[in-house]
Image (cartoon, grey):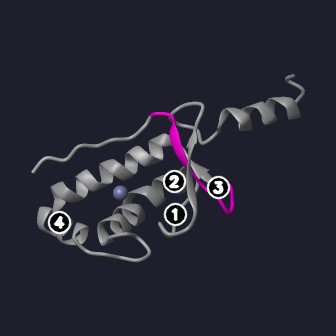
Amino acid sequence: MFQSVYFDTDRGLEETATGSAFSPDVASVHELGHIQNAIDSPQDFIKRRNTTDTVWKNLEEKETTAKYEVPYAASRGMLQRSSYSKGFKSIKTINSINAITSSNLFNIMRSIGGF
Ligand SMILES: [Zn+2]
């Protein structure tokens, strides 16, 4: 079985209702979590991936989000998803490890008199 991991180094995710966001590296931890789950137990991974869930799309997404993504996001003080069915939008971040967009950065700089 082969698995590929895709993530954009400048794409984070923002919850539209709250503006809370996470950085691209949180997304990479999520994707690598799927790989770890597949290594730990291929049968359970496939079983979870073949389920349908109204909140999480499938139970593999729920497992990976709870086991890898949320603890890592919490350690970084970023968005901790409790569902896939809330509104989210992809954001272009200033780098891989921050959830800050260029417009956020502009506002921060302006507020401190940077320009
Ligand atoms: Zn996933």
Q: Three-letter amino acid code at disc 3?
A: Ser
Q: Along the horizontal axis of the image, is 61 left or right of 70?
A: left
| Mark 4 → mark 3, Cα distance in angstroms | 31 Å
Mark 3 = which residue? 20
Q: Secondary structure at mark 3?
A: loop
In which quadrant of the rendered view does residue 15 lie?
Answer: bottom right
Q: Residue at x 53, y 37 (%)?
A: 97
Say if the magenta span includes residue 114.
Answer: no
Position of 13 relative to 60 (above/below): above
Q: Three-letter amino acid code at disc 1?
A: Arg
Q: Along the horizontal axis of the image, is 22 left or right of 33?
A: right
Which of marks 1 and 4 precedes in the sequence?
4
Position of 105 relative to 90 (above/below): above
Position of 34 relative to 108 (above/below): below
Which of marks 1 and 2 precedes in the sequence?
2
Q: If the image is split into quadrants, where does the C terminus sit?
A: top right
In which quadrant of the rendered view does residue 92 lie?
Answer: top right
| Mark 3 → mark 1, Cα distance in angstroms | 10 Å
Q: Secondary structure at mark 1?
A: loop
Would you say the beta carbon of the disc 1 residue lies within 8 angstroms of ligand 1? Answer: no
Which mark is on residue 94? none
Proximity of marks 3 and 1: CB atoms separated by less than 8 Å: no
Q: Three-letter amino acid code at disc 2?
A: Ala
Which mark is on residue 46? 4
Say if the magenta span includes residue 10.
Answer: yes
Mark 2 = which residue? 73
Q: Three-letter amino acid code at disc 4?
A: Ile
Mark 1 = which residue? 81
